[in-house]
């Protein structure tokens, strides 16, 4: 990967599709979380409506092999194994059941990049066209936020970042998308996956347009810069950290502002690029 990286911002000119779709998806997504709560206590051998959604959640995060078919609501041995791995990864009591602590963990807003386990979900290298791209905030605001986020990583690595001239080729592309946007990792509306980015040298960084984004978040909003710093870490090759103080920790609760790299983040980028680190 080149140490000098060009960045492009793609924004759609109309805000109306976002406003209309956000209202629809919000209701659907809240219903999904309510269904997760209704599954509390489910374990191996049970068949309960809604278990297939939990299976899909775990698959999206890398706890099932990519080719696994998850169409049934039956809690089988494979699901129990996936759930135990998830519980162990997040240092929960390993029960193999959908207990209250596990469900609470699943309901925390998070980055959509799969967790670092034995069979992570493979990321697509297909680069789609600009469909379902929407405008959420002013372009100047987004560029300012991302500029500050990139600087955090530039200050501790050999990388430098520059905005690509309009129409030119770039190494990184940043934009807002809704629902299924062509990269095999559809967004789910508010209150679950906030954003995702692809490992080097793919260069795509996608915000979920249906979240409530802000540069000064209240309890019901997501901080643009906090998420930008996190996703840039993925663009540079970092996975999720298990240090809750790290930028690269997978969860980013509403109202949280975390805009400084921890020592764990710095150690991670130095480990990846040790020969040329500052």
Image: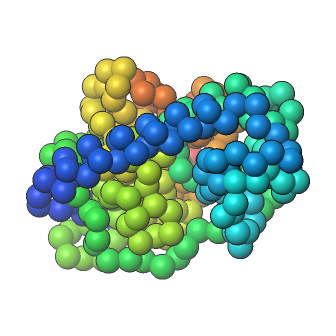
- Quadrant assignment, res 243: top right
The structure residue drawn at horizontal position 20% and vertical position 69%, both measured from the top left corner, is: 165
**Looking at the image, residue 75 lies above or below residue 38:** below
Observer-nearest residue: 152 or 234?
234
Q: Nearer the viewer, residue 220 or 1?
A: 220
Left or right: where 39 falls relative to 236: right
Can residue 105 be seen by looking at this rendering?
Answer: no
Seen from the viewer's position, the closer of residues 140 and 182 is 182
Q: Horizontally, is 156 left or right of 55 in the view? A: left
Q: Is residue 214 visible?
A: yes
Decide which of 111, 158 is in the foreground and name it. Answer: 111
Q: Quadrant of residue 215?
A: top left
Image point (76%, 37%), residue name: 42
Residue 110 locus on image (x, y percent): 53, 40
Q: Is residue 206 left or right of residue 147?
A: right
6 relative to 221, above or below: below
Q: Is residue 131 above or below residue 234?
A: below
List x then y, in percent, for residue 92.
78, 29
Residue 173, how many percent across, how many down? 35, 64
- Lateral position of residue 160 relative to residue 135, left or right: right
Residue 74, percent across and down? Answer: 76, 54
- Residue that protrudes farthest toward the top in the picture: 219
Color encoding of the figure? rainbow
Q: Determine whether 89 is above or below 134 in the image.
A: above
Q: In the picture, which quadrant includes the N terminus?
A: bottom right
Image point (57%, 53%), residue name: 113
Count the marks: how many? Answer: 0
**Which residue: 60% across, 51% down?**
53
């Amino acid at each position: 990967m080149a140490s000098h990286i060009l960045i492009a911002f793609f924004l759609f000119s109309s805000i109306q599709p976002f406003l209309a779709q956000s209202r629809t998806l919000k209701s659907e997504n809240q219903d999904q979380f309510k269904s997760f709560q209704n599954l509390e206590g489910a374990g191996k051998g049970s068949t309960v409506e809604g278990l297939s959604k939990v299976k899909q959640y775990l698959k999206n995060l890398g706890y099932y092999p990519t080719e696994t078919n998850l169409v049934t609501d039956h809690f089988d041995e494979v699901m129990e194994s996936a759930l135990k791995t998830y519980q162990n990864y997040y240092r929960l009591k390993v029960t193999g059941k959908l207990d209250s602590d596990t469900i609470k963990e699943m309901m925390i807003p998070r980055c959509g990049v799969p967790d670092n386990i034995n069979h992570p979900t493979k990321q697509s290298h297909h680069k789609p066209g600009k469909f379902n791209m929407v405008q959420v905030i002013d372009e100047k605001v987004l560029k300012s936020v991302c500029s500050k986020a990139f600087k955090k990583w530039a200050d501790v690595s050999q990388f430098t970042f520059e905005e690509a001239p309009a129409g030119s080729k770039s190494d990184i592309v940043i934009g807002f998308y809704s629902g299924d946007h062509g990269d095999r990792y559809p967004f789910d509306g508010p209150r679950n996956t906030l954003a995702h980015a692809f490992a080097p040298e793919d260069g795509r960084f996608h915000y979920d347009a249906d979240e409530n984004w802000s540069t000064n978040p209240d309890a019901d909003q997501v901080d643009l810069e906090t998420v930008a710093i996190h996703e840039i870490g993925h663009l540079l090759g970092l996975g999720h950290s298990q240090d809750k103080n790290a930028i690269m920790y997978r969860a980013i609760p509403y109202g949280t502002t975390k805009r400084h790299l921890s020592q764990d983040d710095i150690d991670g980028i130095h480990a990846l690029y040790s020969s040329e680190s500052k």
